Each structure stands twice: as C-alpha cells, then as structure tokens.
Image: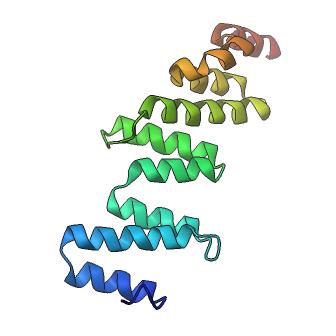
Amino acid sequence: YLQTYGEWNRAAWLAKVRLNPAESSDVLKRWAEHLCSPQVNQKSKAILVLLSLGCFHKVGEMLHSMRYFDRAALFIEACLKYGSSLTTASPHKFIGAAFVDYAKMLRSIGLKQGAVLWASRAGEAGKELLDELPSEEEVDNSLGNIE
C-alpha cells in the first residue's frame, strides 16, 4: 500500500520491522527496482539495498552495467574469495565479462601487467585479449629495461 503511493522509505522500514524475512526481502527488492528506474535513477542506493539482502550477483551486474569495471571485478573477486554465491544461469560468462572489461580498462591506462593478470583470470573470455597483450614475462622484462 505504501509503495503504491510512493512512500518507499516508510514501506522499507515497515517491512523490516513487521514482515517475515521473505516478505521483507520482496518489499526491499521492489524498492531496489524502483531506485533503478529512470525516473529515480539512484542506482548507488539500490546497490546498498541489494547488498543488505545478499543479492551479490545483482550487485556485480549493476556495477558492471554502470561501467564501474574496477569495482565490479574487485567485488566479484571478493565474493569468490570469501565464498559468497554469485548465482546465475552462466556465472563463468558473467565473471569473465567483468574481468575482461577491467583488463581492457587497465590496458587503456597503460597498466599492461594488471591487464594480463585480469585477462588471465577471465578464463575463456580473456583468451582473445591475452593474445593481444604481451605475456607477463615480456612485461617484467620491459619494466627491467626502464630502470
């Protein structure tokens, strides 16, 4: 009822206080969707709501879609490291895309060694980029020539 009349903050508060966890989660997910709508466009706030709900895959997707490639890759890496689930139909494709885009960003600012590292972490998705990049050994050798 509150959501229908645009009282999203009150609806979220009431859901957290009065509803069971499943119903509360549904209300908060709808709030996150509302925050992402073009009329509201508060995706950063929606990310915080989704984080509080443990929707880590959606957070990673949103960071990636917002072109925050560094944050998306590092967030996904932390999820993988600490065992948080990134449930999706094809997690390897999603993870690979985020890692490749971060590697491309690193390459574009001249950080070739970092680009090689993240492209190699991307698995199959990073192979094409790895072929374009010098190997880690070549990067190390070129760094030695600078000194």
Q: How many marks?
A: 0
Report x, y in % for residue 46: 49, 67
Where, by quadrant of the figure, is residue 115 drawn? top right
Along the line of sight, the residue nearer the viewer: 52 or 143:
52
Report x, y in % for residue 64: 59, 47
Residue at 64% across, 20% down: 116
Report x, y in % for residue 56: 40, 50
Where, by quadrant of the figure, is residue 112 drawn? top right
Residue at 41% across, 71% down: 30
Q: Is residue 128 left or right of residue 147?
A: left
Name, please, the residue furthest toward the right: 146
Residue at 65% across, 8% down: 137
Residue at 49% across, 88% down: 6
Report x, y in % for residue 100: 62, 30
Q: Quadrant of the N terminus?
A: bottom left
Q: Tell me if residue 140 comes above or below residue 67 in the rendering.
A: above
Q: Tell me if residue 128 comes above or below residue 15 in the rendering.
A: above
Along the line of sight, the residue nearer the viewer: 72 or 124:
124
Where, by quadrant of the figure, is residue 37 drawn? bottom right
Scheme of image coloration:
rainbow
Q: Is residue 85 left or right of residue 133?
A: left
Q: Quadrant of the C terminus?
A: top right
